[in-house]
Image: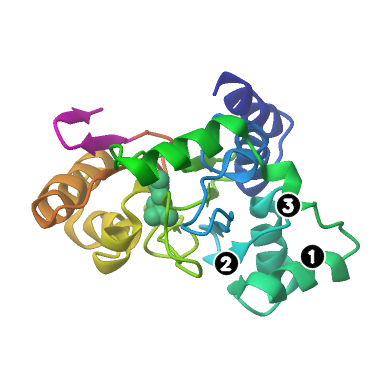
Amino acid sequence: MKEALDAGYAVLEKSGTATDAVTAAIKILEDSPLFNAGKGSVYNNEGQIEMDASIMEGKEMKAGAVAGVRRIKNPIEAAKLVMQQTPHVLLIGEGAEKLWTSKGYELTDTSYFYDERRFRQWKENRKNKTPEKHGTVGAVALDKYGNLAAGTSTGGMMDKMPGRVGDSPIIGAGTYACNQTCAVSCTGHGEYFIRYAAAHSVHCKMLYQNKELKDAVNEVLFKDLLPAGGTGGIIGIDKQGKCGNGFQHNRHVSRI
Ligand code: ASP
């Protein structure tokens, strides 16, 4: 985590953009087997990985995302590519991988994503459903130009159906950024975050109800998602650089 934070911060210190800082931080987390993204992605119910990622910048509300990619080492880079080099927002599976190779990047063999610990976890989970784990990675940043950005990357929910797409690559659900309010990235039970448009809802509460980021985050987590049965967490930063994070996981509830 510290390595990721340092990588993002180093970009900002060198006058880099919030988008590049978010990407640098997320790449480190994607390369670690400890997190459910990139190298550490969880398996679907056929024992395959399918990764989702998205990025959004608050200045012009540009966004890019990929879903269901299997051979891209750093899906957050692919999401950035969609944002910066295509007229689209979300590309899935083969199309996303085609874009990746068309820009001269290599596909990574699926064996790279094999991780012994994850495999055992998956097997164990199939035998006796272990408690659901939120390991998605996200980063939010404010740069010296006053621009906000948010990014999210994930292997999704363990044992998901093939083709299932969660909230992480859905702009407004798992990721949102707007310079008028905040940049947020979510983790948790994606179906709920999609249904409640969680990330966009944080933005709306700030924009239309003048709520502080931390209050908006906690309202979404505790008033919208929790009663509906949706667990998870949100990290965010507002336009003044104030952070507002919240996390709730059944009995474990924390507000920051
Ligand atoms: N939100 C992710 C998804 O539903 C999973 C997670 O955060 O752990 O795909």
Residue occupied by mark 3: 110
**Ligand 1 under 8 Å from disc 1 Cβ:** no
For this view, does 62 lie left or right of residue 244? right
Residue at point 49% right, 42% down?
Answer: 138
Is 253 within the magenta? yes
Q: Mark 3 near mark 1, Cβ–Cβ under 8 Å?
A: no
Which residues lie in the magenta part? Answer: 244-256
In the figure, residue 193 lies in which quadrant?
bottom left
Disc 3 crowd, CA 10 A, few/some/many (<14, 14-19, 20+): some
For this view, does 12 lie left or right of residue 126? right
The disc at residue 100 is 1
Disc 2 crowd, CA 10 A, few/some/many (<14, 14-19, 20+): some
**88 vs 137: above or below:** below
The answer for how far apart the CA atoms under marks 3 and 1 are is 15 Å
For this view, does 244 lie left or right of residue 33? left
Indicate the colouring scheme.
Answer: rainbow
Q: Earlier in the sequence, mark 3 or mark 1?
A: 1
Residue 120 placed where, x, y %?
Answer: 50, 34
Residue at point 67% right, 80% down?
Answer: 87
Q: Amino acid at mark 3?
A: Thr
Q: Quadrant of the C terminus?
A: top left
The answer for how far apart the CA atoms under marks 1 and 2 are is 19 Å
Q: Earlier in the sequence, mark 3 or mark 2?
A: 2
Task: Look at the numbered disc 1 and give the secondary structure of its residue.
Answer: helix
Task: Look at the numbered disc 3 and give the secondary structure of its residue.
Answer: helix
Q: What's the magenta bit mostly, secondary-structure-wise?
A: strand
Of residues 244 and 64, the one drawn nearer to the viewer in this rendering: 64
The disc at residue 62 is 2
Residue 23 placed where, x, y %?
Answer: 65, 44
Disc 1 crowd, CA 10 A, few/some/many (<14, 14-19, 20+): many
